[in-house]
Amino acid sequence: MSAVGYAWQRVTLDTIVGGERTVRLQPAGTLEVTLAGKQAPPDASIRAWPGLEASLRDEPALDQKLEGRRTLRFERFPAGAYTLAVQDGYYWRDVTPNGRGVATVEAGGHARVTIEIQHVDLVQPAPLAGTLEFAGDWEATNVRIQFQYADKGAESIYRNVGARGRHKITPIEGRPGHWRFDAGKVRPGRWQAKVVPSGHRSTITVPPEGLTDVKLRVGEPATVRVRVMEADTGKALTDQRVTWHMTLTQGISSWSSDSATWDEAAQRYVIRAPAGTLHVDTGGDRYNGKEKTVTVRAGEQHDLTLTVRATSIVDVEFRAGDARIPFDWEWDLTVKEIDGEGEGFMFGDRDQVHRVWVDRAGRYRVSVREVPGYKPVAAQEVETTPDKPAKVVFLLERAD
């Protein structure tokens, strides 16, 4: 939906309740982007994110293929400040930056921005290969190496090496615990290598000419025995999921964790990990706690206790008359403890009820920024307990 001088806007129609709907359109202007310098790659896109210091890992407000064009014009573009980038690849992974700029679009105005294409021919893939050694008592089966790019400007580039697939790792005949891997050609720069199994992480810097003699070594394992205790009762919990990871390479902002195993005889969760600093955590829909770190040495046993608190649940329902209105994430719902630091940490939807898990029992304020098409609603307070979900119902009235 749009009108002269206003931006195109997606409108959600309420087929449950029906009736009239008032839509407030956002003022708009024209955005004109000119590309200078080198020719962008054939599949490159121009993308825009709200804000002058926006994160390029978020979903862009504009994502348009260049298709060889050097000048692009966007009519009825929402007024505001934007970060723009020319990128090759998906914005959330395997992205290569080609140029960047900023622009402020004023209502009824015409914003022009020139982006210099600089990074097309500067990065050529280079080979990455080498050997992997397991020292000590490791069950080295289904061995894999997960490479993740760590330098800024090209986030979310991965390369997985395993027994199957294009990039392989194979055992070296006559040398137990030794493997040879070939990751193919990768982008030069810093990479984090995570070895599975073991959780070992190390940093590799690939020069422009590449590396073909990398030597990865997973040292003798250490053992960490973990107890999980309920803070208020002192009860030991035996049905939790305990996860851990080694310290990350600087620049890595997303990662996968490994799981501890339950030892029935010891009544402990057990982690086998290389020497170094471990980050250990537990949590879920019933209990929530804070991460702990422990530094371990090869061949030694360490004991660690994680303290958790029972979580609570707040069920939030929106109603217009007798009809339930399905929750929309764009409404910006917040659930925060009134006299503490508790807040919502996990969310889900079931039967048109929005379920929020909060850190612990207490008194919480539940608020929603806006429900388009309806009058503003006042925040509500609710008391939560671990035993039974608390319920909040927002009664909606149509806006004039």
Image (spheres, rainbow, N blue to C red):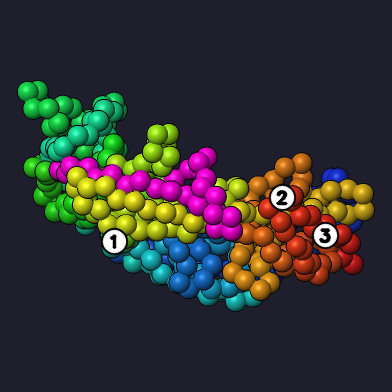
Sequence-first tag of 1 and 3:
1
Q: Image quadrant of residue 164? A: top left
**Percent from the top left, x then y, of residue 323?**
88, 48
| In this rendering, the label closer to the viewer, 3 or 2 | 2
Amino acid type at circle 3 is Phe
From mark 2 to mark 1, how far is it between C-alphas?
42 Å
Residue in the foreground of this view, choosing between 118 and 400: 400
Q: Is residue 2 visible?
A: no
Q: Secondary structure at mark 1?
A: loop
Q: Residue at x 58, y 55 (%)?
A: 233
Judge the density around disc 2: few (<14), some (14-19), many (≥20) Cα neighbours within 10 Å. few
Q: Residue at x 18, y 42 (%)?
A: 220
**Percent from the top left, x then y, of residue 138?**
22, 34
Does the magenta segment cover residue 352? Answer: no
Q: Residue at x 43, y 39 (%)?
A: 267
Question: Which residue is under mark 3?
Answer: 394
**Percent from the top left, x then y, of residue 276?**
24, 54
Amino acid type at circle 1 is Gln
Q: Secondary structure at mark 3?
A: strand
Question: Which residue is under mark 2?
Answer: 387
**Percent from the top left, x then y, of residue 300?**
22, 47
Question: In what quadrant of the picture does the C terminus appear?
Answer: bottom right
Judge the density around disc 1: few (<14), some (14-19), many (≥20) Cα neighbours within 10 Å. few
Question: Which residue is under mark 1?
Answer: 250
From mark 1 to mark 3, how far is it between C-alphas?
44 Å
* Magenta-drawn segment: 216-242
Does the magenta segment cover residue 219? Answer: yes
